[in-house]
Amino acid sequence: MVDLDLLTTADVSAILNISTRRVRAIAQARGVGYKLPGSGQWLFDCDDVAAMQDRPVGRPKERGDKMPKRWRLVEGDIAASDLLEEQVKLADQGIVAEGGLVVIEGIAEAAEYLWVPSIGRVGIAWGADADWADVPSRDEGIEMWLNDGEQFAARN
């Protein structure tokens, strides 16, 4: 028997009490749901919703051993609305911005970044609006965001 009880992004948003942007970001990071080709609309079943319920909020927590968090970049579409809006604004001005995902070791959900090389600015979103800073390079900015939040915030 086929299960036809599918939920939209708005339905899941209401169930989990999170934004629709956050629903899309979690779905992409965890590989759940189904994105309808060409529409940007997502559909979910009950198993997908269950897989999205356990989630961190805010910046990744400080590690007790104070060892730097390890991370890697992966290709992927950014879903954070504020990063997407900024990317469009920059493109309208002819400014190139590169976006992608930051996979943090030991954390299921990826952060998203937007790097603007011409002005040395990076925005990083992980479950909330993006944090921005002026940094020498994309990688240094990501490293600073993960391991020295105060320094990152001071560069905003």
Image: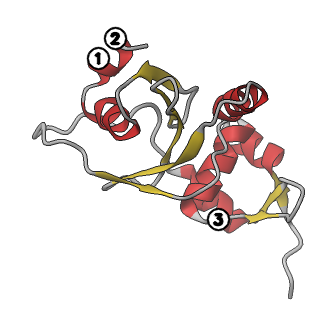
Please tell me whether residue 16 is drawn above or below residue 130 in the rendered image: below
Give the residue at x 14% y 37%: 64
Q: In this view, does 152 lie above or below 115?
A: above
Percent x, y for residue 110?
Answer: 48, 50
Query: What's the amino acid at mark 1?
Result: Glu
Q: What residue type is labelled 3?
A: Val
Proximity of marks 2 and 1: CB atoms separated by less than 8 Å: yes
Residue that mark 1 sits on: 150
Pointer 3 with pointer 1, Cβ within 8 A:
no
In the picture, the disc for residue 93 is none
Name which residue lies at 12% across and 36% down.
Answer: 66
Element carrying mark 3: loop
Q: Could you say where residue 101 lies in the image, as x and y percent from the top left? A: 51, 50
Q: Quadrant of residue 130?
A: top right
The residue that label 3 is drawn on is: 32
Q: How far apart are marks 2 and 3 (CA)?
A: 36 Å
- Element carrying mark 2: helix
Q: On screen, 13 above or below 32?
A: above
Q: What residue type is labelled 2?
A: Ala
Position of 74 compared to 41: left or right?
A: left
Residue carrying label 2: 154
Nearest-to-viewer mark from 2 and 3: 2
Q: Distance between the residues labelled 2 and 1?
A: 6 Å
Most extreme residue toward the left is 65
